[in-house]
Amino acid sequence: MAERSEQLIRKAQATHCLTRQDIAELLGDADCEERLAQAADAVRQEFVGDGVHLRGLIEFSNICRQDCCYCGLRRDNRRIERYRLTPDEIVELARKAKGYGYRTVVLQSGEDPYFSVLVLCHILQRIKKMNLAITLSIGERSREEYQAFRAAGADRYLLRIETTDAELYHRYDPGMSHANRLRCLWDLRELGYEVGTGTLVGLPGQSLDSLAADVLFYQELDADMIGIGPLIPNGDTPLGEAAPGDFHLTRRMVSILRLLLPEANIPATTAMETMVPHGRELILASGANVVMPNVTEGDYRRKYALYPGKICVADTPADCRQCMQGRIAAMGRFVARDQGFRHHRKPNS
Ligand code: SAM
Ligand code: SF4
Ligand code: FES
């Protein structure tokens, strides 16, 4: 490993601050990966402890009005079987998630216009009565809609910027506006949500410098959660023939994120495990502290087909809960019992 990388890792661990060029250098040094992960794991332990937060993921509709070039849910994909859960089914899944011991649910979908403010607020109010923290991940909406969801009980919102490179974004998210994506994130911030965002690693043409800019953007936004994952090419999309995102580069980015945003909640994403068996444990040991097991039931899991090879499609919510509990314990960590809000605090002395 280059001496320069060792210096940069020490600087990041001590000051939580690096320049764009420093970050790009570390991202580009494959030999520093283990050392980076070790430093990130120490910072994770110091700032957010050994608890791993489990969030129950409910994939409630795969209908989407957008046409992102990488995603199987895109509007123009005719080869996907569409589904939409009813409000009662969504509330029932949340109730079951609570029964499995989850303290948080993540309601995720394509950009499905059926879920108007009226429909969604009613669902949020019903779930809120169960004393669950609620994360929404349903794409771009107006400030007024975000405000209404917040008032109805949504605590957190996940909206990846995907890339901070506006040109790249417009290439792969046709019909969408990077400026509007930023507007959404800043609105969510101002409305008092815990804001989650992140990068899709491996978009063709994405440079190390661009990934470094993403990290600095997360610092500027003071993101509460950052979920990053590699692109997994989906044959039913325009990026079907693209090279997959680099697992190791993604892992280095997770570690750098932990060093530079020490208090953030950082998930070990499903896409990491789709690429590498036990990839989530590896990422949990490289700076991450959150896992989002699926609580969607039956065939809907398979139909929520962002990319091929998705894990757990034949497993039940109870299987996934038990599986993660065991795997986390085997790492010498534990499942956190609180609702997993970000703690603004100084490191343990
Ligand atoms: N529609 C909402 C949105 O776009 O924010 C939420 C659901 S969307 C399916 C969640 C995330 O899936 C996206 O932010 C994107 O990064 C990721 N994703 C989509 N297609 C992917 C692929 N082929 N490989 C890896 N991740 C993918
Ligand atoms: Fe729709 Fe989200 Fe997929 Fe884009 S990434 S096509 S907005 S589900
Ligand atoms: Fe689903 Fe392991 S997390 S079976």
Image: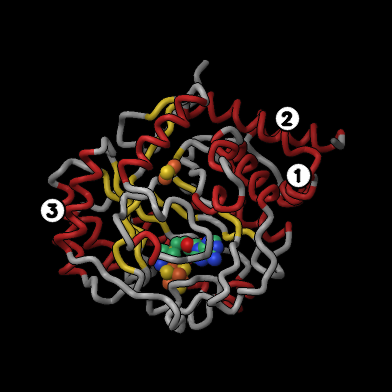
Q: For the residues carrying marks 2 and 3, which lies nearer the camera in this image?
A: 3
Q: Residues within 10 Å of mark 3 (few under 14, many from 20)?
A: some
Give the residue displayed 63% in from the left and 73% down from the top. Answer: 168
**Given this view, does label 3 or label 1 mark the residue nearer the observer?**
3
Instruction: Provide the residue designation for mark 3.
Output: 126
Residue located beneath label 2 in the image: 10
Q: Residue at 79% across / 32% down in the picture?
A: 6
Residue type at mark 1 is: Leu
Q: Are marks 1 and 2 in contact (CB under 8 Å)?
A: no
Q: Which residue is mark 1?
A: 26
Examine the rendered structure and indicate whether residue 320 appears above or below residue 330.
Answer: below
Q: Amino acid at mark 2?
A: Arg
Marks 3 and 1, the one that precedes in the sequence: 1
Please state which of residues 73 and 202 is positioned toward the viewer in this rendering. Answer: 73
Give the percent coordinates (x, y) of residue 73: 43, 72
Tell me which residue sits at (26%, 38%) in the image: 100
Instruction: Describe the element under mark 1 as helix, strand or loop.
Output: helix
Helix, strand or loop status at disc 2: helix
Decide: is 47 above or below 235.
above
Give the foreground label among 1 and 2.
1
Query: Can residue 79 be spotted in the picture?
Result: yes
Within-10-Å neighbours for mark 1: few <14, some 14–19, many 20+: many
Residue toward you, 40 or 300 = 300
